[in-house]
Amino acid sequence: MVSTMSKGRQELAQNFSSRAAARYWQATLARDARADGAFFFGVKSTQIYCRPSCPARRPLRKNTLFFPTPADAEREGFRPCQRCKPNEIPQAVQMVQRAAQVLKNDVDEAVSVGMLARKVGVRSGALRRAFRQQAGLSPKELSAALRLKKFKQLLREGSSIIDALYATGYGSTSRVYERSDAHLGMTPATYRKGGKGMKIQYTTTKSHLGEVLVAATERGVSAVYLGDTTAKLVSELREEYPRAEIAAAKGEYSKWVEEIVSRIEGSAPRRELPLDLQATAFQRRVWKELQKIPRGTTRTYSQVARAMGQPRAVRAVARACATNPVSIVVPCHRVVRADGNLAGYRWGLPRKEKLLERERA
C-alpha cells in the first residue's frame, strides 16, 4: 500500500514543473485566494489537503505535495481540511455564479452593482471582491460581455441589426457601433453576414497540448484553435462563421500546419505565416506588438500598452488578447498579469503554462 501511494504521488508530482511548484508554494505561503481552484496542497504529516487560501498554519515545504484536483488528493489518501473545505465550491465562486446567472437572465437590462448584489443577497463590496478574485473583471464588464455575446448570437441566427440591438438593451445603434470594432473585429453588418462569401478550409492534428485546428483561406491563416476534440473545435469554427463555406482541407496548408505545431512544441519560427484576419486597426497593432515578444519571455498587459504608446489602454489590450483568433502565431500566451501570474487564456491556463515552459526550455 505504501509503495503504491508513493508511486502515485511521484506520478502526480511529475505533472508540475519545478517552476510551477515554486509558484504554487509562494501562493500557498501568501494564502492567495486567486489561486484557489488552480491547485490544492496536501500535508504529508497530517494527510490533510487544503486550498491555497486556507487560514490554517503553513506546513514545511518538504511536507507539502501539490494536486491538480481534490479527487487526485483523495485518491492518494488525503482528507479534506475542515476549515477551508477544499472539496466544496468556495463561497466567492458561488456568489459569482449566482451573479452571472442574474446578469445572463437580465442581459437586456442595465444592472448596477448595488442592484445585482441585492438580487444575489450579498453586500456590494463582497460581490466586487469576489469578482476580482474569481473572474478578474468587474460585474459591469461581465454584463457587457454577456450582452455582446447575446447580440452576436442573434446576428448569427439571422435577426436584423435593429432587432438585435433592442433585444439586448443597447437602445441605440451608436452605442454598439462604437464598441463593435474592439469586440467584434468588424462592424455589426459584416459580422451578421457570418463570413458569407468566405471560403475557409481547416485541418486538425495532434500536439502535446491536445488537438490543434488550423483554418485558412487562400490568403492566409484565419484561425488556430486548441482543444480536446476535433468535433468541438470544428463546431466553434462553424459557430463563428455560420455562413462561410467551410470544408476540410486536402493538404493545401500542410506547411503552415507543420510550422504551427513546431511552434507549439517550443521551436523557434522557421518561416513567416501569412494571415487573413478580420480585425480593427487597434487589434492589429496589439497583435503585431505581441509578435515582438521574444520566445521564452513574457510581458504584462501594461507593458504592451506602453510599448504601443497608449499606457492607459491596458483593458483594451487585454480584450485584443482575448479575441485573438490565431493563437501561437500571435503569441497572446506570452502576456501575463502585473504580478507575474498567468491571466486568462481562451484555451485554458494549463495549456498557457505548458507553452511558456516549452519556450523557456
Image: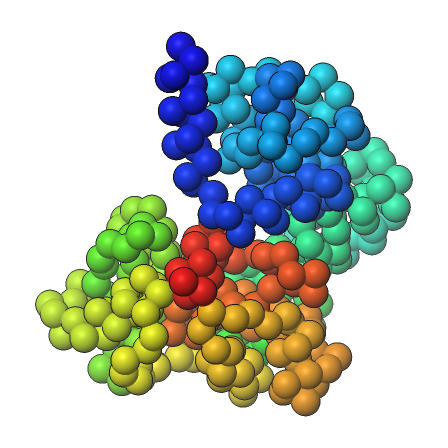
In the image shown, does 94 or 5 lie closer to the viewer?
5
Q: Residue at x 16, y 67 (%)?
A: 249
Q: How many marks?
A: 0
Kindly indicate the quadrant of the structure image that contains residue 10. Answer: top left
Camera sees residue 271: yes
Q: Which residue is the extreme one toward the front?
A: 62
**In the image, residue 120 lies at what x, y percent?**
78, 36
- Left/right of residue 131 with respect to residue 77 in the rendered view: right
Would you say 237 lies left or right of 46 here?
left
* Residue at left offset 38%, top offset 74%: 329
Residue 271 in the image: x percent, y percent?
27, 83
- Quarter of the image where one finds residue 242: bottom left
Q: Is residue 12 above or below residue 75?
A: below
Q: Position of residue 321 (x, y in %)?
A: 54, 69
Quadrant for the N terminus in the image: top left
At x 75%, y 43%, the residue is: 30
Residue furthest left as drawn: 250
Between 332 and 248, the residue placed more toward the observer is: 332
Task: Residue at 72% x, 17% y: name it.
Answer: 82
Question: Does residue 163 appear anywhere in the picture?
Answer: no
Left or right for 299, reference 225: right
Residue placed furthest toward the top: 1
Residue 181 versus residue 264 in the image, above or below: below
Where in the figure is residue 106, as x and y percent of width and height? 69, 48
